[in-house]
Image (tube, grey):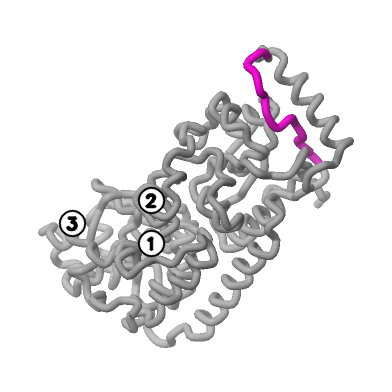
Amino acid sequence: MPDTRSTGVVITRRRWLTGMLAAAALPAVAACGRGDAANAGAGPTVTDLTGRTVVLPGPVRRVVTIPMPAASMMIAVAGRPDVLAGMNAASASAIRTGFLGEVYPQLLSVRTDVAGAEFAPNVESVLAAEPDVVIQWGDRGAGILDPLTNAGLTVVSLTYGTQDDLEGAVTLYGELLGAQERSKRIVDGMRARRTRLTERRPTGTSPSVLYMFGDADGFPVAGAGSYNHFVTELVGARNPAGAIAQQRATIGIEQLLAWDPDIILLGNFGPALPADLYGNPALASLRAVRERRVYKVPLGGYRWDPPSQESPLMWEWLAGLVRRTGAPGLRSGVVRDYEFLYGTAPSAAQLDTILQVRANAGSSDYADFGR
């Protein structure tokens, strides 16, 4: 297969400081920017996760992130919040209700109108944020990429869903920001903790763990194409929805009752709490309900459900639930990781909030979880 990584170099001017340029002039401006930057070679050259080479016209100090996990990941790799010039509104909602919103209140004023439904960019708002680079999905069609590049913006693209994608994104952000040492430390830490979990994977019958996205209505679950499936298998458990190829699928109550999972996880993309399932008479026969093994997934610098810089903490949290060991040392691990990632250690009260102690108070084995 031919190597296509040398194609598709996108080099453009970093800022449009006036509104004098008519829309018809955009392609010409973009072409001029590509030539100027290629000759100047002032910024880093990176290969994004789609294999496309991108040469930046200068140092990266301001970033707009359209993929949801990218905002907090960029902050963690940079080691500071001021690198973020714009983000997806869904990223902001996690920050607003999570740890980062408390320790970096300035993030609450970062613009969130840079994208609409299905990651479609709001080009006018992105331009107004004056980014050095825009992070966008590269595997979801040209319709969400071309408007950005046609407007003269430098775009770096991501792929999504696997641990390799996660490590590749962290590495890419380090190259963009000149923070390779920090990004390497994050990736090396992930690999070491993954190895330890694999070596300690329990033998014998695997408990079943069903991840549900937490919607208020219906039962959307994570299939084999999801990162949640990877995490479930990593800790030695079994995903009853593993026969579903998709990342996400909605099932009926009959299927849920037929699967009868040992553990149910409720994600942070919806409001559902363990109490909602415990109080639902239609679910009273479920093993996870009878044994009080329904848990709301933690939310820290970002949601722990999808792949992010905090994924190793999710692995350890779930391993503690599956093995019924309570994940001893998890709380101190959160403190240690957050001191590096965000420069601030969470207080005991903040740890309780991150680990959803209140929401999970009625669930088994959670009273002293992580201590």
Secondary-structure class at tag 2:
strand
- Residue 333 higher or lower than 4, as above or below: below
> Where is residue 94 drawn, in percent x and y?
39, 49
Query: What quarter of the picture does the C terminus occupy?
Result: bottom left
Which residue is depicted at the point 19% across and 59% down?
277
Percent coordinates x, y for residue 85 in the rendering: 56, 39
Q: Amino acid at mark 1?
A: Ala
For label 3, the residue is 276
Q: Are marks 1 and 3 in contact (CB under 8 Å)?
A: no
- Please name the residue that numbered disc 1 is placed on: 241
Mark closest to the chain's N terminus, 1 or 3: 1
Q: Position of residue 356 (x, y in %)?
A: 29, 64
Of labels 1 and 3, the one closer to you: 3
Q: Of helix, strand and loop, which mostly describes the magenta segment? A: loop
Magenta stretch, residue numbers? 7-20
Position of 199 relative to 79 (above/below): below
Q: Amino acid at mark 3?
A: Asp
**Mark 2 touches mark 1? (CB < 8 Å):** yes
